[in-house]
Image (tube, coloured by chain):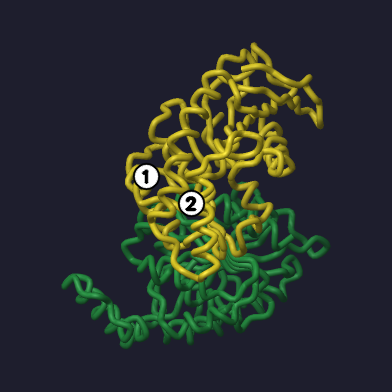
Chain colours: A green, B yellow
Amino acid sequence: MNFTSEPRLDDGVLERDFTLGEIPGTLWMPESASAAAPAPLILLGHPGGVGRMYPRLAGRAQQAAADGFAAATIELPGSGDRPRSATADQARADLRQALQAGERVSDDIVDRLVLPLVDQAVPEWQAALDALLALPEIDGPVGYSGGVISIGVRLAVVEPRLAAAALFAGSYVPRAILDEARQVAIPLHVLLQWDDENNDRQMALDLFDAFGSKEKTLHANLGGHTGVPQFAGDAAAQFFARHLR
Amino acid sequence: MNFTSEPRLDDGVLERDFTLGEIPGTLWMPESASAAAPAPLILLGHPGGVGRMYPRLAGRAQQAAADGFAAATIELPGSGDRPRSATADQARADLRQALQAGERVSDDIVDRLVLPLVDQAVPEWQAALDALLALPEIDGPVGYSGGVISIGVRLAVVEPRLAAAALFAGSYVPRAILDEARQVAIPLHVLLQWDDENNDRQMALDLFDAFGSKEKTLHANLGGHTGVPQFAGDAAAQFFARHLR
């Protein structure tokens, strides 16, 4: 991991960009974190495009820092300045066409759109975790927050350092991920926008039902994809405060 | 309203029993409430049998008082020491029989069990509200918390003094109540136990979907009817703190 910017201090939070190989990322650290008092870490998931997502990511990082947590994110494969994937672009075009035609989005499109992304992204988040946990100011436990929910599910299954996850049910979920969900055992906090235009509500409920975790909570709120109310963000923060301290 | 006990002081909360005509009830008041600084009020719903439910009701009242709210409950028709209803007893026997036979509980049984209860209980809660709001230490706004969810739905439709409701999706819901739910416009916080043995999950989701409120949140947690986790109670308390202050 190479830091590519000087730390910027904003409201008690040190923000710093880095690269991990070719992958750009950002780390936010509470000013109070030190080698003597290392902070737990929340990985901030997102739909891809950290530049476009920056204001929302920084807002979530500020909240995490206020609770004493470091936060970090990396760009997704095929998004931002990273090389595009012909497979993903084709799947995205097919998705758009199906939506415009008012057709049901087929399992095949969802698989082509999501599964290669999960296969590539999850090892990258794990590599980021290796690098971040090597910093003296950061320690476990680790949480994953946000979407792409299929990335969160896979990470929860394969990454033993993940202690809790707050997942946003805001994207298409392949059938295969539904099966993986049964193997998830960590505490989960699932956020569902009841009228999410990008999301199949029944699939989200099926996914919640499938999770193997003994503690799992679904918070459904009225509104569309980007209409998550402030109090829902607060509830997710409280979930991490319960599990990462 | 006649007070039938001296006030008992427990941990900063004044508890006092009363009767409203033939109906017994209990009022909990934060010690700090006064005519100069009256408290908002939370009506504590329950499945009937305030004696049996006392520990849980008192716990919820303590939480309400800690947030600066008065809380009150009254016995339901046909429960506790109140005269039993032959109709309700018959419906309850039919329900038990259907459950023991592993049959689907028919709409007819649910209607006979719940609708007369709602018809009788709601005006009683409104009469209790008249009496409670006449006390100098209590003021609006008013919240309703708990089950029977059909009572909460009807009350939210007909009672304009109700400003917010935290409803427990833990009982059978007649189809007619689903229609009334569309008229509900106040902020709602709905609690669902995902594996509630007394409750049809799909019906609970349909009911949540039907509510006309612009702000509605569903909190679903793993576990059975009585397994509501502590953090879910905390979240309901925060909902009232947002809406009753």
Residue B51 vertical position relative to residue B31 in the rendered view, above or below: below
Find residue B228 and report its image quarter: bottom right
Q: Decide: few, some or many residues near mark 1? Use Cα within 10 Å; few <14, some 14-19, many ≥20.
A: many
Which is nearer the eye, A71 or B98? B98
* Horizontal relation, residue B11 to residue B137: left or right: right
Residue B91 is marked as 2
Which residue, given by chain and number where applicable, does mark 1 sit on? B181
Name the amino acid, label 2: Ala
Q: Secondary structure at mark 1?
A: helix
Q: Residues within 10 Å of mark 2 (few under 14, many from 20)?
A: some
Residue A4 locus on image (x, y percent): 56, 70
Q: Quadrant of the C terminus of chain A?
A: bottom right
Q: Chain of mark 1?
A: B
Q: Nearer the viewer, mark 2 or mark 1?
A: 2
Residue B43 position in % (x across, y down): 57, 33
Q: What chain does badge 2 belong to?
A: B
Q: Residue furthest right?
A: A36
Vertically, is A76 above or below A217? Answer: below
What's the amino acid at mark 1? Ala
Under circle 2, the secondary element is helix
- Do we see residue A69 in this rendering? yes
Query: B167 and B95: which one is in front?
Result: B95
Name above or below for residue B152 compared with residue A233. Answer: above
